Amino acid sequence: MGPESRRTGVIGVKCGMSAMWDKWGAKVPITVLWVDDNVVCQVKTAEKEGFFALQLGAGQKKEKHLTKPEVGHFRSQGVPLKRKLKEFPVTEDALLPVGTTISVRHFVPGQFVDVIGITKGKGFAGGMKRHGFSGMPASHGASLSHRSIGSTGQRDAPGRVFKNRKMPGRMGGVQRTVKNVWVYQIDPARNLLYLKGQVPGPQGSFLFVKDSIYKKPDRALLPFPTYFSQEGEEEDSEPLVANLGDIDPFMVAD
């Protein structure tokens, strides 16, 4: 694993949010992701496609719910039918053979990751909700315009509304990336990933998790190109929690 090596990500299902308390008694907001049976479905190389990438599939789906091209793609690769596909760019040394299973052990507690998802759709929203406008006066002189956005331009010059003006419109339902999300805990027995804080998307939506770009994890601790269980190795039944250090944060000021 070199300094420019890039591993694949994983596909997770958002289970919801909760809260946990660390060993010092501090409350940690938690988002739980389920890494649902991630399998490498296709390998793309520079010789054939012009770049290196891995296509991952997650979940399960019946053949009658897939199109014929989708079924043919899975059959040609010799992998089970998957519900969700996602392509992750990787470097040549991080390629994996088709059929490789990627579990939650792909990540290490304490590292930072980037999470990509589709935000919750809010429908057509006004300026006060969509952009945080304060609105018009709530009492005298404002007739049926309490939540109006007000003026949107000038007079005869320029005689138009400038582009990118903040106005009412469809809110949410767009792709967003939350960077530098801390991995608080992983549960290998149930393939659960516990992240600190919030991530985009409603409960049950698919999220794409990969190593952080700005807060790069310690390469010596990461399994490269992914985690492979050794023969005779017992699976961890207990969750793995990030190292919080030996200094109580509540006693530092004393």
Image (tube, rainbow, N blue to C red):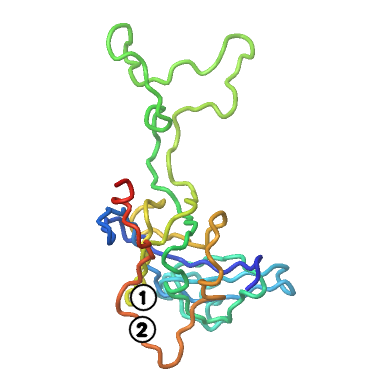
Q: Is 7 or 152 nearer to us in this picture?
A: 7
Q: Residues within 10 Å of mark 1 (few under 14, many from 20)?
A: some
Residue density around tag 2, few if under 14, some if 14–19, many if 20 or more, within 10 Å: few
From the image, tell me which residue sits under label 1. 188
Mark 2 to mark 1 CA distance (whole Å): 8 Å
Q: Dot 2 lies on which element?
A: loop
Expressed as whole percent of the image width and height from the top left, the position of residue 252 reads 33, 50
Residue at point 36% right, 73% down? 191
172 w.r.t. 113: above or below: above
Q: Residue at x 35, y 67 (%)?
A: 241
> Residue lying farthest front?
254
Q: Amino acid at mark 2?
A: Glu
Q: Find residue 146 and report its horizontal and vertical position in percent.
A: 33, 17
The answer to the question of whether label 2 and label 1 lie on touching residues, with beta carbons closer than 8 A, is yes
Query: Which of the pair 200/230 is nearer the observer?
Result: 230
Q: Name above or below for residue 188 compared with residue 210.
A: below
Q: Residue beneath label 2, please?
A: 235
Quadrant location, the N terminus:
bottom right
Q: Quadrant of residue 77?
A: bottom right
Label of residue 86 in the image: none
Counting residues from the start of the chain, the first of labels 2 and 1 encountered is: 1
Q: Among all residues in the image, which is located at the extreme top?
A: 141
Residue at screen point 32% across, 15% down: 144
- Secondary structure under the numbered disc 1 in the rendered image: loop
* For residue 212, above or below residue 6: above
Q: Amino acid at mark 1?
A: Pro
Q: Position of residue 149 (x, y in %)?
A: 42, 21
Side of 75 relative to 18 (left or right): right
Query: Left or right of 132: which side holds 72?
Result: right
Front-lying residue, 57 or 214: 214
